[in-house]
Amino acid sequence: MPSKVLPPAAPPASSAVKTPRRAPRRGAGASPVAAPLPEGAPPPARSGPVPIDLALQGGGSHGAFTWGVLDRLLEEDWLRIEGISGTSAGAMNAAVLADGFAAGGRAGARAALDAYWGHVAEAARFSPFQRGPLDVLLGRWTLDHSPLFVTMDLMSRLYSPYDLNPGGANPLRAILEKAIDFERLRASPVKLFITATNVRTGRGRVFRNAEITPEVLMASACLPTLFQAVEIDGESYWDGGYSGNPTMTPLVRELESDDTILIPINPVERPGTPRTASEILNRLNEVSFNAVLLKELRMIALLRQVADPGNCEGAQWARMRIHLVRNSIMDTLGYSSKLNAEWEFLSMLRDEGRKAADAFLAVDAGNIGKRSSVDLDVLLEGV
């Protein structure tokens, strides 16, 4: 996500005062920003761990970038992850982390993420979606020239998953059942908010720890051109990205933390005008899967400009401090690579995620618990 879209916040005159989430609010102005920490400097001394929540976007195998970010953040003992909102691949990362944390703390969460993505790569060895020889030779991660991917892409516009996959098989189920103990997940200290889109109503539904099953996670990642809708409680669900990628509302309403670290997958801004069919479809995908999140962030920016948002829910939104792990690698990748689950690709994205988290901590660690590190006011331009 280019810095041009969500630049660092400009320092205003005063800072907001933090109070517990459910305590009466004292108003909220724009969050100031501190001077960046020197490269490699440790975070400022604190009296205890700082509670944070995470917002994880979806994006198929591009979610391995988020794996790397999470792996790096889990090394920081001064950060306490209170809750995670995730969609699609973000939902998988969230559930695996929460289950691993319940089993073995930070080390358990990191090991669980490693194992999950290893299972994904192992399953992909038998996938029909493989890079073409020329792409392998040139070091390109795209599947645009893969004969089977091109065939699938064309057929998905003529036939539905109910025609091509009448049994409703989904390889993700076996991976999830191997990687996650869903009984243990219910008792995890990390609160989860997983979004899926109700096909009938078009609205998002947010599932919490006690409700999460393999079906819920499969629903959150259910692209309707590839898989049959997932039925839960008599309702059919598609990918949560259509209604919240991810959903910010439960982080505001249900958690004590006022700091949200957003880990994006889909670029908000991409230079140039797409001209080829694949470029146009890729950009349409990015715009649609970012739309709801940008509306929620825009609401935070708008409420911060209110002189006195009072003590109601509006004040809770206004007080949220937003931080962003910037992600430039996605500007070089297109839609088809979201279906590329080769281990070499996943491990490259993991390493890029760790580097991005390192850069984030070097610059913005001093802002966490105190002030936003991105300027959301740019989202109000042109409105």
Image: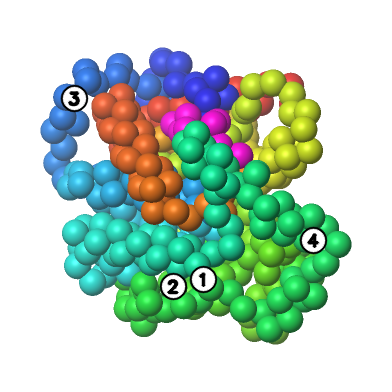
The secondary structure type at the circle numbered 1 is: helix
The reply to whether residue 256 is in sight is no
- Residue on which the image places disc 3: 40
The residue mark sitting in front, 3 or 4, is: 4
On the rendered structure, is 106 left or right of 115?
left
First in residue order: circle 1 vs circle 3: 3
- Residue on which the image places disc 1: 172
Q: Which residue range is magenta in the image? A: 326-334
Q: Is residue 14 above or below residue 304?
A: above
- Residue on which the image places disc 2: 175
First in residue order: circle 3 vs circle 2: 3
Residue type of the residue flagged with mark 2: Ile
Image quadrant where residue 102 sits: bottom left
Question: Mark 2–mark 1 contact, CB under 8 Å?
Answer: yes
Question: How many angstroms separate mark 4 from mark 1 (CA)?
Answer: 22 Å
First in residue order: circle 4 vs circle 2: 4
- Residue on which the image places disc 4: 155
Q: In this view, does 287 lie above or below 10?
A: below
Question: Mark 1–mark 3 contact, CB under 8 Å?
Answer: no
Mark 2 Cα shell of 10 Å, populated few (<14), some (14-19), many (≥20): some
The secondary structure type at the circle numbered 4 is: helix
Position of residue 19 measured from the top left corner of the image (x, y, whole percent) = 35, 44
Image quadrant where residue 357 sits: top left
